[in-house]
Image: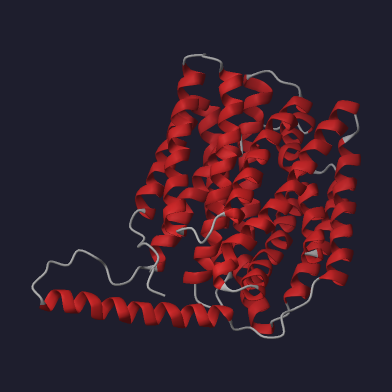
């Protein structure tokens, strides 16, 4: 598992940046919530075509290590440039470029995991990968908490994040190896076709016996795509302005905001770990339950904030459980995407998360700034309910194989 070390360094840096950037824009740069959303949305929109491009290029060349190393090196250089300028226009351009290099390693690492291990072990290994890298994200939040408490400058934090990505680059060069053979997803695709034919004959025989057929023979990849898009958009819409909610609405210091988001990451770690320990779970059932649970949690959070009933305590509890549900969801949706999305189009997953993330970055801060956080929480609950309704149309995995 040494090849994961570079990803852990990278996640430490981005765990720190996840809270630092919104606070840096609204504090040091005197920007608004809408500015936070616009900058984040621009970065995500710019990265969308590159998500597909990097995924296609890495699968076409089968040089996964090259794209992962290039991603870490590019981010390291750009973060150093980010720390050395105060021009708003240049900062926005650099931030957008960072997102372009960020997506360069996403599709390759998903392919590596799916090709290193057989399909029955995807859930466990995706879960373990997310658990270890999520631990890095948690360390980044802890690092941000400590540095902000001790009064370190914004420039120092950005340079530190640059050095962490440089360490990720060096580690990836020496620890990652491209697989000698690429065949596991081909086998999964063949298995799905065989199961589809098998189910078709089974339902056809039932029809000949005069029984009413209510099952669908196959499932559309578009269902997965629309559900993922709705879930990602809602998550981005909720979490983009959330650090400012704790900072301005609940009047917490920056160091405490880092501490609160450590709860969310801790919850995600629990979800990743439990996913890795589950024995061949039904991925389709997991994503449905996770979306529904998030909708219910947002309704509880809405009531707490609207009624001023222990808003800080219940917000912290909600963040923890939201993290747990996200851990279950993300591991299962990754496994499903590698099963259902055709070979050579692994970047489609990142395109969808990028589109949803970009739209959410625009919508979330706009709603929070113009209508307040209670309305944001209500609309987020509706968004997660919509994703649950979409995922409900996914068939259960075939148990005949």
On the picture, is 19 further left or further right than 187?
A: right
The x, y position of residue 20, in whole percent, is: 76, 37
Q: Quadrant of the N terminus?
A: bottom right
- Front-most of residues 163 and 219: 219
The x, y position of residue 234, in whole percent, is: 49, 44
Q: Tell me, yes or no, if residue 84 can be seen here.
A: no
Decide: is 98 above or below 321: below
- Picture quarter containing residue 6? bottom right
On the picture, is 398 further left or further right than 217?
A: right
On the picture, is 173 further left or further right than 193?
A: right
- Picture quarter containing residue 110? bottom right
Decide: is 33 above or below 359: above
Q: Residue lying furthest bottom in this view?
A: 181
Q: Quadrant of the C terminus?
A: bottom left
The x, y position of residue 373, in whole percent, is: 52, 26
The x, y position of residue 99, in whole percent, is: 70, 56
Residue at x-position 91% and y-position 32%: 152
How many discs mark residues in the rendered view?
0
Colour scheme of the picture: secondary structure
Q: Residue lying furthest left in this view?
A: 210
- Front-most of residues 350 and 391: 391
- Picture quarter containing residue 241? top right
- Front-most of residues 94 and 102: 102
- Front-most of residues 157 and 393: 393
Q: Tell me, yes or no, if residue 243 can be seen here.
A: yes
Residue at x-position 83% and y-position 38%: 143
On the picture, is 234 further left or further right than 56?
A: left
């Amino acid at each position: 598992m040494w090849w994961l070390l570079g990803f852990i360094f990278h996640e430490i840096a981005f765990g720190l940046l996840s809270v630092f950037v919104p606070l840096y824009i609204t504090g040091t740069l005197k920007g608004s919530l809408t500015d936070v959303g616009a900058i984040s949305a621009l970065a995500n929109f710019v990265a969308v075509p590159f998500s597909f491009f990097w995924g296609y290029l890495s699968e076409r060349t089968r040089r996964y290590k090259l794209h992962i190393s290039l991603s870490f090196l590019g981010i390291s250089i750009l973060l150093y440039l980010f720390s050395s300028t105060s021009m708003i226009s240049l900062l926005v351009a650099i931030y957008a470029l960072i997102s372009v290099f960020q997506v360069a390693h996403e599709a390759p690492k998903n392919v590596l995991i799916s090709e290193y291990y057989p399909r029955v072990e995807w859930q466990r290994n995706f879960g373990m990968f997310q658990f270890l890298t999520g631990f890095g994200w948690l360390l980044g939040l802890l690092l941000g908490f400590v540095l902000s408490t001790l009064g370190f400058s914004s420039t120092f934090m950005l340079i530190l994040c640059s050095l962490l990505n440089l360490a990720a680059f060096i580690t990836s060069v020496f620890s990652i190896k491209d697989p000698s053979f690429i065949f596991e997803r081909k086998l999964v695709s063949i298995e799905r076709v065989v199961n589809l034919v098998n189910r078709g004959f089974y339902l056809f025989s039932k029809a000949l016996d005069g029984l009413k057929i209510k099952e669908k023979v196959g499932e559309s990849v578009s269902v997965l795509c629309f559900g993922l898009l709705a879930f990602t958009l809602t998550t981005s819409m909720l979490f983009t302005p959330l650090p400012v909610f704790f900072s301005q609405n609940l009047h917490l210091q920056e160091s405490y905001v880092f501490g609160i988001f450590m709860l969310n990451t801790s919850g995600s770690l629990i979800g990743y770990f439990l996913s890795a320990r589950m024995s061949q779970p039904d991925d389709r059932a997991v994503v449905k339950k996770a979306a529904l649970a998030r909708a219910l949690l947002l309704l509880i959070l809405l009531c707490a904030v609207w009624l001023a009933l222990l808003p800080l305590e219940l917000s912290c509890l909600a963040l923890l459980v939201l993290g747990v549900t996200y851990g279950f969801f993300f591991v299962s949706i990754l496994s499903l995407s590698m099963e259902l999305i055709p070979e050579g189009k692994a970047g489609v997953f990142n395109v969808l998360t990028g589109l949803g993330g970009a739209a959410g970055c625009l919508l979330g801060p706009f709603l929070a700034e113009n209508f307040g956080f209670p309305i944001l929480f209500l609309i987020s609950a509706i968004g997660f309910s919509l994703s649950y309704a979409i995922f409900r149309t996914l068939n259960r995995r075939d148990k005949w194989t």
